[in-house]
Image (cartoon, coloured by chain):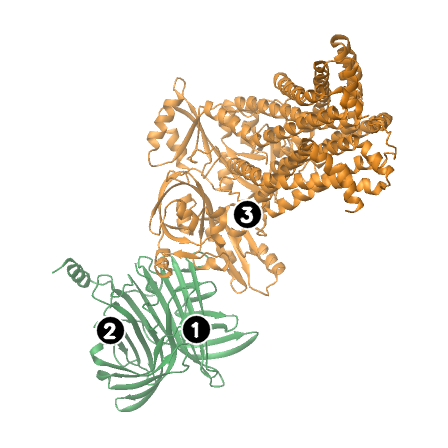
Amino acid sequence: MGFRTAALMLLLAAPVQPPTFPKDHGSHPEAAVEWWYYTGHLGDAAGKAYGFQLTFFRARDLYLAHFAWTDAGAGTFAYDEKAHLGLPGIAGASETGLDVFNEDWSVREQKGVVHLVAGRRDIGRLELTLTPAKAPVLHGGAGLSRKGAGEKQYSRYVSITRFAAAGALSRNGSRTALSGTAWFDHEWGPGALPADAVGWDWFALQLSDGSDLMLYRIRLEGGASPFSAGTFVPANGGGPPRAIAWSDVTLTPLTSWTSRRSKAVYPARWSLAVRSLDLTTTVTPLVADQELVTDKSTGVTYWEGACRVEGKKDGRPIGGRAYVEMTGYAGRDVPGLLKP
Amino acid sequence: MNGFSLIFCALITGPARRHPIRVLLPIIGVAIGVAAVAAIHHANRSVTASFRDAASAVSGRSDFVVTGAAGIPIGELAALSFLWPIGSFAPAVAGSAVLDDGSREVAQVLGVDWGGDGAVREVRLVAPTSRAARELLAQKGSVFVSVPFAERHHLVAGAQLLLVAGGVRQRVRVGGILELSGLARASGGDILVTDIFTAQDLLGKKGLVDRVDIVLDPGVSRADAGREISRRLPPGLSLEPPARAAQTADRMVRAFRLNLNALGSLTLLVGIFLIANAVSIAVLRRRPEIATLRALGASRASIFSAFLAEGLAIGVAGTLLGEVLGLFVSRAALRAVGGTVSSIYLPTARIAGAGYGGAVALAAAVGLCAAVLATILPAIEATRVAPSPAMRPGSIEGIARRRLWPRALGAGAALCAAFALSRAGPVDGFPLFGFAAVALVVLALALAAPLAVRLGAALPGRLLGRSLGAEGRLAAGFFGGALARNGIAVTALAMALGMTLAMIVTVDSIRETVKVWVESTLRSDLWIKADAGGRSGIVGDLPPDTVAFLEGIEGVAAVDPFRARETTDAAGHPFTLASGDFRVVARVGGLPLLGGADPRPVALAARRRGEVLVSEPFARRFGAAEGSRVTVATPSGPRSFRVAGVYRDYSNDRGTVVLDRALYISIFGDPRITSAAVLAQPGVDANALRRRILVLAGDRFALSISTNRELRKEALRIFDRTFAVTRALEAIAVGVAVLGIANALLASAVERRRSFGLLRAIGASGAQIRRATLLEALLAGLVGTAAAIAAGAAFGWLLLGVINPQSFGWTVALRVPVATLASAALLVLAASFLAGVVPGRIAAAVNPAAALQEE
């Protein structure tokens, strides 16, 4: 038994301190890498569908942020990015609770409700109030999610898989009222991935029966990593969250989309099935181009977008919304994972 | 061949070919003047441009810069967060470091907000690849350097770099190499770019930034945003346009630059006199030819044009030569000026050569204009030559003789005007009227010179005549017979030598004053500052615990911590804000007050009442006096203090306001120190104490320690270096002027061939004629020197009494270094005597028969 394996076993054997809230929704400066990830599906009074992504990254003292806006009706996608050192009035995150900001983008929790602000002049200013519809979920057992066998290849991973979202998008004096659902992921840790990882795919499904499903697949040179995994969160009253092993999952790309900017070829539709849930679905992007080229911040090129879910669960038809993230298709880099 | 070229050949080209030396001299004169103008203009422009480039490299696209009275506490950045919807802001930490890699170079340190800084400043990474660099970026302790800097210091990404910053020896890692563009151009590429936190650690500025650059989005009103920012800024912070920093730096060295300009003009003035001299000699020489040509039908206009063309030709040739010379001179001037600026004013300033084109154009224009100006009068004289071949040479002198007294009156009027101008105050800190008065004295000198020549020929002429016989009378006659020509030569010499003598008096007086001042102020045994790589200036400050460290060392009786920071008043005029321990002043004195009062009770009272002491230059510059109030920007907004006294200070021409250290720390919360004076206990050897301090400091502090004697010597060394450029220019001017005398005498000798021939024919020996010519040279030198002493007295009075107090703000005790003055005068006298050697030989060699035949 080598030293590394011994260290790993010690690490795994060590009791993981369970997170406490709201403190652990805040920043963990001892962790090299940390991110707060909000995605959501919104609709206006006219029934038009929108998607948003707002991500705050922290890599030591460096704070990065991405915001993306998908207008399904118009078929458009726009995004913006920010990068700063953690400085008052510029970028930072509280250690006592959820209060993260970068320039004038922010997420702040007050009395159990999250206030989210982001935007860009031409997209508009998005202001949302997010009311949690579910309790926080700790992925990977007590919230320690392994990404590989290496000592530092893990992160602490907490989600709130469903919020009721309400607010508005203001642009040039006009205000569009919006409502829908949102999803929150929070990860912190050493942030290392296996050396042979080429990228990863992440799925956040909100199904029409009130259940949610998170899945991530770490792609190695030879296929999916055994550390790929997921969590199923039943509808309220449906029991505790359940860990999903990757062996339980079948994921097949159906078509592909080629980016003109980065020349990357991404899967464009997926067939996704989880045997133990008796779930078979097709996940289809609302807009084909939801790619982010983030030269000004993380330097990572990835696809992250709002999708539609159609399929069957327990033999009955089921629908839903999803956010899908695909990295490593334009080269070997993964968002937020700056090597230590 | 048309008429003009025929005339030009007859009058100009022909004689020039026969006597090339006579054309060569004024060409050299113009060349030296043009080279001096080009070099000084280039040096000055380079200083200004370097400041502007350095400031714009650091301020980038910034619309506004926020600065603080004592840095900006990082928490106050939050007050600017309202800007995000309409723009960006980028804080930065600035300072300097001395490289500890053997080169001992100074580099600027700038800590920025990686990522966000791109909105204001640009950096382009050359190595390593961007992805790897980004990983290093996220790590503290990495600095980024420009390509030329990396090459010079043999650095690659990942290399270690040793430096002294904030008074401590430190080690940083080279995170990457930057293209020499954008921010990396600041300080000529000698900049270490790093993140804010690393810069704070390096420079000992925890929790502070030095500036915040604000860039507004397109379409946002600058005026509205500026008002809104000012409204929201916490007290103690101020908003200014980004060009302010360059203006402030430029203002710091302005007095120095303007004085350079004035001296450069002097050199050119001497050049103008040389051309006038040469052309008028040419006119005199060629009177018979002119008369012949006029008789043959040449018009006045064509004669005028021919001589103007000659002047222009001399001007063009001299300018061309001067431009080439200027290329070399400007390099030396740039080094000298750059050295002075960085050693005295701003240690991290890099004076890079600006475009030379402007200097070339200016020097060419000045050289050609000078040539035309200098030629016009003699050329007009040439047109007055009547078309009679029998006209004898020398009648121009008759004109000069007739105008003698009106000219003398003009000279008197010019002197009166100069006196009147000298009473006027400075214009925006520049002694404009003082320099105008100097110009008027030069004019008076030029007007009075023929009279001086006449008097010179009359008075000592008799004396010479009695003691030296025939040769003496001959010399006096020669000299007095060429009023116009010798007048010009004497003016040139008197002007150059007079200015030199005045500068000798000024510099010597200031030096002596400084020496006395240094001796009365430097009471401490040791003077300690952050290791500045052997530089005399200050590079970086010392951590506050240096004071306790020094106090704890055996043999130390007292430590006087001194803090000095550059600041500006509300209008952007720079001055130095300092603090010292008034208790130490109360104990040992060492702060000579202007009125001669004992500084000890004044310092004690100032400490008790929270008052300040200001330096003499500050008092002059900002109109302060004992009992008046001065306003200083502080972290809690502007505060006004009563002035308890004005002290003499020659170390800083911007002016200094000194607070007691306790008051300073309570207001500014800045415990760091710039330097510390240490008093040794009685019987403790200063050198031994220095060694002990250095050993105990070890790796904790990087100190540079001077003993009292070394510091005194250093103060005078800095002083001498400041005036080195001045001295060089003076020497050039005097050299040119002596050349002018040689030229005038040479012309006289050639012109008087007939007289020499006649003299020889009636029995004078060649030796007698040579002696007479040498005596004439001596006479010219004597009259020139006498005029120089008179002019020098006027110049010296203007320099010491008007220009110096107005541009530096120093009171200087007059000291006349008789020996130096006498030796300078004697040297010039000897040089002018020697200038008579060649003309004397020519005169003696005249063949009487041939010379008479020419008639």
Indicate left or right for B723 with B301 as reference: left
Q: Nearer the viewer, residue B762 or B553?
A: B762
Chain letter for orange, please.
B
Earlier along the polypeptide chain: callout 2 or callout 1?
1
Is disc 3 in the same subunit as disc 2? no
**Which quadrant of the structure image shows residue A3?**
bottom left
What residue is at 48 percent from the left and 64 percent from the top? Answer: A104
The label number, if any, that marks residue A68 in the structure image: 1
Nearer the observer, disc 1 or disc 3?
A: 1
- Dot 1 alpha-carbon crowd within 10 angstroms: few under 14, some 14 to 19, many 20 or more: many
Q: Amino acid at mark 1?
A: Ala
Q: Amino acid at mark 2?
A: Ser
Dot 1 lies on which element? strand
Dot 2 lies on which element? loop
The reply to whether callout 3 and callout 2 are in contact (CB within 8 Å) is: no
Is disc 2 in the same subunit as disc 1? yes
- Dot 3 alpha-carbon crowd within 10 angstroms: few under 14, some 14 to 19, many 20 or more: some
Q: Which residue is mark 2?
A: A228
Between the C-alphas of marks 3 and 2, the distance is 55 Å
Question: Does residue B791 appear in this view?
Answer: yes
Identify the colour of chain A in the image: green
The label number, if any, that marks residue B514 in the structure image: none
Indicate left or right for A318 with B16 as reference: left
On what subunit does the disc labeled 2 rest?
A
Residue A268 coordinates in the image, percent (x, y):
35, 81
Q: Which residue is mark 3?
A: B236
**Which quadrant of the structure image shows residue B270?**
top right
Q: Nearer the viewer, residue B487 or A253?
A: B487
Q: Amino acid at mark 3?
A: Gly
What residue is at 23 percent from the left and 70 percent from the top? Answer: A141
